[in-house]
Image (spheres, rainbow, N blue to C red):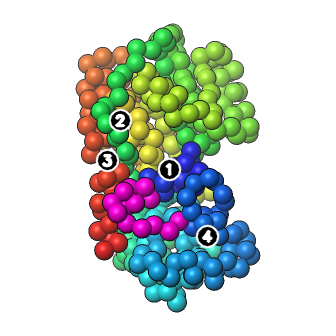
Amino acid sequence: MNKKRGDGRFSSDIINEVISRGHEVVVLKAVDDGLMGEVVLGRGINIFKSLSKISELLKDCDVIHVIDPYPYGVIAWLVNRNLKKKLIISALGTYAVAPLYRWRTSYLVRQTYKSAHKVVAISKFTKNKIQEKIKLNNLVIINPGIRLDGETPKRIEPSERFIMGVGALKERKGYHIALEAFAKISKEFPDLKYKIVADYDKSYRDILDDIIKENNLKGRVEFFSEISDEELFKLYSSASLFVLTSINTADIHFEGFGIVYLEAARFGLPMIGTFDTGGEDAINNGKNGILVHQNNIEETAGAMRKILSDQGLWKQMSRESIEWSKLNTIEKEVDKILEIYI
């Protein structure tokens, strides 16, 4: 489990919360990440070589809970044909849907989904994307939650004013749209910067660097990667606005939910996201943020301008974000998951 990735953090939070409630958990994983769990999930043909060992490790479990249908959901389906356990599949987004579009994986994924006691989509949008390819009677929605860990973090008076985005440096995160929108308001807010926290991807970074050069934004856009949680939280605490204008790409990649929206909300940040993504569940539109249409630079710039130029609106949305984060906790998420387990 890579806790820096959305799926890794999602899994880790659920596992730790379930354990904290007195349940025993067996964790199976593909790589040794230094965290709890047995490294038995292979790749390619090695997946099938590990089936007997996986079956042995799971034989005393009451529930098998797997993240996404392929490849690990398929493994769970195959071993569960003999074990006859209650199978739960969390459908996190892109990788819950894309295998349904590939002829090599479609049949296996369909059978896996049908065999599950419940398929748990993390958003209405993810549920709808699955239903476009397969009609299921076992499909439910449970939105992810975050761990609040005590009191609401205090805002930090920043040395400079900036907006921020967090997530993988990929086209589907829509940084190129947000960056073009930032360019449009840059002269109105000459002291404003844009800070992007993401891993490094050269091809997409080159696209963003071209936008920065074309709009004379050198020195006003900063990229951060491999930063600590402490450093990330400091950015959340001092930013003026959270922006993640995700888009749905032609290769069936999309934002399944966007737990970073909830993380930003915990720090009282107003935010901007997009319609027709999982962000519709992660943002309370019109209350703690504004949803805009995908690929719409003008609308995104308008939303930025509206929030940044109205201090009263900013304070109202900041308060709403904090309250929204309190409604979307890992404890409430796991309450619903445990109801399915039982």
Residue with the mark numbered 2: 266
Q: CA distance from mark 4 to mark 1?
A: 19 Å
Residue with the mark numbered 1: 9
Secondary structure, mark 2, is helix
The C terminus sits in image quarter: bottom left
N-terminal of the pair, mark 3 or mark 1, is: 1
N-terminal of the pair, mark 4 or mark 1, is: 1
Sort mark 1 into few (<14), some (14-19) or many (20+) by Cα contacts within 10 Å: some
Name the kind of residue labelled 2 in the image.
Arg
- Can you tell which mark lies on residue 283? none
Q: Residue 236's x, y, as percent?
A: 44, 28
Sort mark 3 into few (<14), some (14-19) or many (20+) by Cα contacts within 10 Å: many
Q: Nearer the viewer, mark 3 or mark 1?
A: 1
Residue with the mark numbered 4: 71
Q: Which residue is pictured at 64% across the width and 38% down the height? A: 199
> Visible in this render: residue 81?
yes
Residue with the mark numbered 3: 328
Q: Residue 285's x, y, as percent?
A: 31, 40
Q: CA distance from mark 3 to mark 4?
A: 29 Å
Q: CA distance from mark 1 to mark 2?
A: 16 Å
Q: Which residue is pictured at 50% across the width and 68% down the height? A: 26
Name the kind of residue labelled 3 in the image.
Asn
The N terminus sits in image quarter: bottom right
Above or below, 153 against 204 in this view is above
What range is drawn magenta here? 14-27
Left or right, 74 with respect to 188, comes to: right
